[in-house]
Amino acid sequence: MKKIMILFAHPAYHKSRINKTLINAIKDLDGVTINNLYEKYPDFFIDIPVEQELLAEHDIIIWQHPFYWYSAPALVKEWMDLVLQHGFAYGTQGRALEGKWALSSISTGGRKEVYCTEGKNHYTINEFLAPFHQSVNLCRMQYLPPFVVHGSHTLAQDQLKTCAANYRSLILLLRDSKINPAIFENIEYINEIIKQDA
C-alpha cells in the first residue's frame, strides 16, 4: 500500500463546496494524510523540517487547491519555495523525493472549453500547470496528469457526489498500486482512468 499525502491549500475552506466535498470523501482512508496548510500555517511560518519529514514518509504527493489566478493559493508557492530545498529535493545530493509520484488536484469555476487555444483562457490546464510539472521533474519525481473539476460553482448536488466518488476511487487506485504508469502518456486528466476502471 502506497502512502499518499494531500497537500491541501484553501484560504477560504469554510466557503468551499467542491474542495470540502472532496476532502470529506477521502479523509477516512488508511494510508492517506491530509496536510491542511492554511489550518496548520495561518501565519505562513512553515516548519520546514516537519514538512520535509512528511514528504520523505509518503510515496505520492497531491497538491489539492482551487485554481486561483491560473495557479495555486499563495501558501502553496511559499511551501514550495521553502520546503523543496537544494540538497533535499534537488541538486546532486538532493534525492529525498526521487521516484515518488506527484500530481495536482484542482477545482476551477471555468468550463473545460475555455481552457484551450481557442478558448477565453488561451491555454490548457496542463499548460498552466507547467511550473508544477517542471518542479516535480527537477525533484526526480514523476508528474501525473491532474485531477480537475471544472465548473465548480455550478455543480448540482448529484454532480458533487459524483466528483467525490471519482476522487475517492482515484485515491484508492493510487494507494493500492492499481494503475499502470504507461497510461499517463495518453491522457489529459487523470479523471479519465476512473471512467476506464468503472
Image: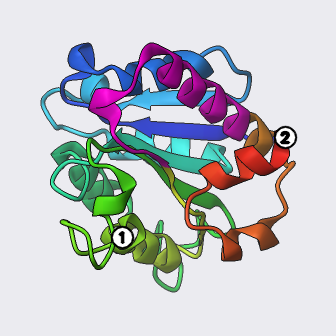
Pick the residue in front: 174 or 146: 146
Identity of the amino acid at label 2?
Asp
- The residue beneath circle 2 is 176
SS category of the residue bearing label 1? loop
Q: Quadrant of residue 149?
A: top left
What residue sits 77% from the left and 68% below the top?
183
The N terminus is located in which quarter? Answer: top right
In the rendered image, is residue 144 in sight? yes
Q: Position of residue 196 (x, y in %)?
A: 80, 51
What residue sits 26% from the left and 40% below the top?
46
What residue sits 31% from the left and 39% below the top?
47
Rendered view: 93 above or below 104? below
Q: Quadrant of residue 87?
A: bottom left
Rendered view: 158 above or below 113? above
Q: Earlier in the sequence, mark 1 or mark 2?
A: 1
Residue 165 in magenta? yes
Give me the C-alpha separation between circle 1 and circle 2: 30 Å
Residue range highlighted in magenta: 148-171
Residue 131 in magenta? no
Q: Position of residue 114 (x, y in %)?
A: 28, 61
SS category of the residue bearing label 2? loop
